[in-house]
Amino acid sequence: MLTLQTIKADPEFVVRRLAVKGFDGKAVITEILEIDAERRRLQQKCDSDASELKKLAASIGAHMKAGEKDKAEEAKARVASIKGEAKGLQDRLEDCEKKMLDLLLTVPNLPCDAVPEGLTAADNVVEKEGGAMPDLAPDALPHWDLAKKYNLIDFELGVKVTGAGFPFYIGKGARLQRALIQFFLDEAWKAGYIEVEPPFVVNAASGYGTGQLPDKEGQMYHVTVDDLYLIPTAEVPVTNIYRDVIIPGDDLPKKNCAYSPCWRREAGSYGKDVRGLNRLHQFDKVEIVRIEKPENSYAALEEMKDHVQGLLEKLGLPWHILRLCGGDMSFTSAITFDFEVWSAAQQRWLEVSSVSNFETYQANRLKCRYRDADKKIKLCHTLNGSALALPRIVAALLENNQTPEGIIVPECLRKYTGFDIIN
């Protein structure tokens, strides 16, 4: 969440930047400032009363010693009066602090200056592109038909066992999944990311820490008996490693990668754009996460973008990078770049990665801080990115690499699959 200091430093600037995300922040920022003024007034009263109690305690002893019983009794009465008011003051102060936190949680992160204005995906900016478009026959098959033809993925069996959006991967389809996961993890390891295998369920505190709660309850699967959530991305458990941690400055950056299944309800999703692997409720992904000093985070963001680009180039997929406009960004992000690959048979772009810098927004929720060279404690910057999400990568690989003899496996995956063609 935004720090109170950020809001108080220039409320009008905050409201203007929130508008870039399509968020009308004037009323809530005004209310936050009013509650802060009341909170400070109450805190000053509490501090003043504490100071007076200290003086009164000393005066009672002095009056008694001097035989000034009446004055001592007056001081005792004043002590009783202050203590009688203290509980009410403390309750009002705690109420202000709760209201303040509740309001701060409703305010999105500020988009950085590089974020384009706009409210929909149509306003996103293509920043970079690469890869050769495949030359397929007019009767090229979409991936769901290829998956059935070569017995790679069984969508109907998934419906039977669980429901729509939970496919079975079979035979070479399962090996291709596992090959991609291992390839992505190995490439992340080569790039200096330390692998972790996190839990696949998290508590509410972790969801709040990275901003999935209270913003995305409707998209998360909730295990109500234990009050745990199935993770929508490994970003959640991995970033929460650093919750309530003060990191020595010399230990930054922290670079982690993790494989996990991911679960998303995707409520309201329907139509041709969600057919096959285009949108699932459960899917596999390798995530990269970085914790950085603020002055280094945007250089780190470029490194992460280069890493994802390199993966797509090794897979031989046509790709482009979108710089998202304010209205198409997540609640928590300061800037986001989406990577999309070309799906030849569907004739459309498929998102396979989002790489984001959250600046101090997540770190403030997490209390993820570092100690600088002057021993001062400061908020870190957090970043993450998909490197990569599998379903649409698989869809594009199947469609773009189909030939009359079968589906050609990219060379970088063959040592993992054990085969170079699916037929």
Image: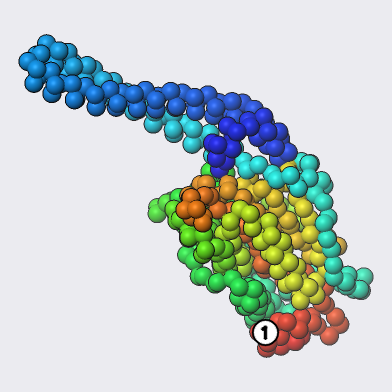
Q: In the image, is 281 to the left or to the right of 214? A: right
User: Looking at the picture, how far across and down is residue 314, in whole percent?
Assistant: 76, 76
Res 154 quadrant in image: bottom right
User: Looking at the picture, how far across and down is residue 292, in whole percent?
Assistant: 58, 58
Quarter of the image containing the C terminus?
bottom right
Q: Nearer the viewer, residue 16 or 165?
A: 16
Q: Nearer the viewer, residue 247 or 26?
A: 247
Q: Which residue is mark 1?
A: 417
User: Looking at the picture, how far across and down is residue 46, in whole percent?
Assistant: 34, 26
User: Looking at the picture, how far across and down is residue 370, in whole percent?
Assistant: 50, 55
Res 174 quadrant in image: bottom right
Which residue is at 70% across, 53% downward? 336
Most extreme residue toward the front, as rendered?
Answer: 66
What amino acid type is highlighted by mark number 1? Thr
Residue 46 at least partly seen = yes
Which residue is at 47% across, 31% downward? 99
Colour mode? Answer: rainbow
Q: Is residue 124 above or below residue 189?
A: above
Res 349 quadrant in image: bottom right
Count the marks: how many? Answer: 1
Which residue is at 71% across, 85% downward? 414
Q: Is residue 260 above or below residue 334?
A: below
Which residue is at 51% across, 56% downward? 373
Q: Is residue 255 above or below residue 332?
A: below
Q: Is residue 392 above or below residue 57?
A: below
